[in-house]
Image: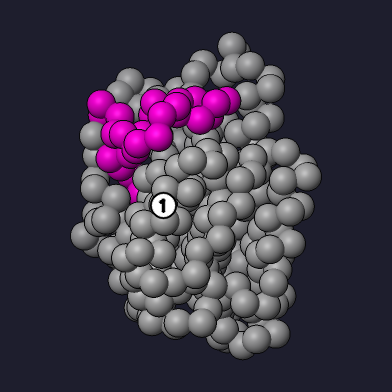
Amino acid sequence: MSTRGGTALVTGASSGIGAAYAGRLASQGWDTVLVARRAQRLDDLAQRLRETAGTMVETLVADLYEPDDLVRVARRAADDDVGFLLNNAGINGYGPFPGLEPELMARVLGVNVLAVTALTRAAVPAMLERGHGTVVNVASQLAFAGALPPHPLPERAVYGGTKGYVVTFTRTLAAELAGTPLRIQVLCPGLTATEFHRSRGDKPVPGRDQSVHEDGGMPVDQVVDASLAALGTGEVVCVPGLEDPALIDGLAEAELAIRTAARRGGS
């Protein structure tokens, strides 16, 4: 996957999966555009990547919930040098739905759904025109949690719904673009050793250094390893730690069976 001369745009690059993925892509020769809310974090990461990988690094300080910021990042994603888009930015907004603050709910929907869709729409046409490109959208294993009760799972109706959207959107887009040179993947990590649970998303985690929430989880490098390996084999749905990929095939088979049975029932 070494493609020196190409550019990867990474959202949520100030920590966790985004920072680790950006580092891996830079080590493979990608120039990078790092997008996040925390300017100092981005500057620190950019300096490290320039020193260790010798690649070009841009930083875009942006809050993807803010319309003007989203438009600005989308314009960069649409440039013809962007060959890899990682839609990693996301916030959780965990909490009981009846008490969920409307402003936080809107922010979760804006960042997790609208931004992912808008940036993918911005990047894909230029990738198709150029004849190559990769889009990885980060969802969550909670997209498959459905009616499973909270405790130990979080109260997650809105967050789980947004990640369910990312899974369906990405799988459907991959089917639409089948036969083109583009690689499309939805990455569905489980609990990961990042600082994600240290904020509900209304404000970024403070401080200059990355941290890890007390819940622990899979190391971020293993999540990145799984995603890159799945890109190499053409897997659309990547669930790090899943040992039996037939379960993903079973999901598609169950969906087909439901639609087929429903059509029969309505005849």
Q: Is residue 155 above or below residue 262?
A: above
Relative horizontal placement of residue 184, taking residue 19 as reference (left or right): right
Task: Return the x and y of residue 86 as percentages of the image width and height.
Answer: 51, 60
* Percent coordinates x, y for residue 187 in the rendering: 42, 57
Disc 1 designates what residue? Answer: 45
Task: Tell me if residue 142 is in the magenta stretch.
Answer: no
Task: Locate the N terminus and report the quarter of the image it occupies.
Answer: bottom left
In this view of the protein, can residue 139 be seen by the observer?
no
Which element type, helix, strand or loop, lies under badge 1? helix
Judging depth in this view, the residue of 162 and 212 nearest the camera is 212
Q: Quadrant of residue 181?
A: bottom right
Tell me if mark 1 has few (under 14), some (14-19) or many (20+) residues whose alpha carbon lies within 10 angstroms of its own: many
- Front residue of this view, candidates 89 and 206: 206
Residue at position x 60%, y 64% in the image: 172
Give x and y (percent) for residue 80. Answer: 67, 78
Q: At x 68% / y 38%, what residue is drawn? A: 65
Q: Tell me if residue 163 comes above or below residue 125 in the rendering.
A: above
Q: How is the image coloured?
A: one colour
Marks counted in the figure total 1
The disc labelled 1 sits on which kind of residue? Leu
Is residue 185 visible in this depiction of the protein? Answer: yes
Magenta stretch: give its range.
188-215
